[in-house]
Image (cartoon, rainbow, N blue to C red):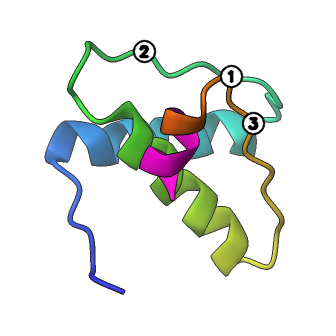
Amino acid sequence: MEAVNLRPYQDEARRAIEREWDEGRAKTLLVLPTGCGKTIVFAMVAKDVVDRGGRVLVLAHRGELLDQAA
């Protein structure tokens, strides 16, 4: 699998999500403009969770979104 390098603002978004979780907030929301890489950010967050032994369930209302995430 090819390594993915997040852009600085994407990495900050990933770290912000994980900070929210570390502070006890189970629900958080990522907002970025169209084309700024929300899918790749969420995929990296999911990878971080799995790398730490956790599990992730991805749900989407369109198959294309699941294809992008895969």
Residue 25 in the image: x percent, y percent? 79, 28
Question: Disc 3 on helix, strand or loop?
Answer: loop
Regarding mark 1 in the picture, which secondary structure is present there? loop
Q: Is residue 70 above or below residue 11?
A: below
- On screen, residue 41 versus residue 61, left or right, reads left
Is residue 25 in sight in this rendering? yes
Asked whether residue 68 is drawn in magenta, I would say yes
Question: Which structural element holds mark 2?
Answer: loop
Q: Nearer the viewer, residue 32 or 70?
A: 70
Q: Quick check: can you spot residue 15?
A: no
Q: Residues within 10 Å of mark 2 (few under 14, many from 20)?
A: few
* Residue drawn at x 50%, y 22% as measured from the top left: 30
Q: Which residue is mark 3?
A: 59
Kindly identify the residue that appears in the image at 83 percent across and 31 percent down.
Answer: 26
For residue 70, the mark is none
Q: Quadrant of residue 39?
A: top left
Q: Which residues are magenta?
A: 65-70
Q: Which residue is mark 2?
A: 31
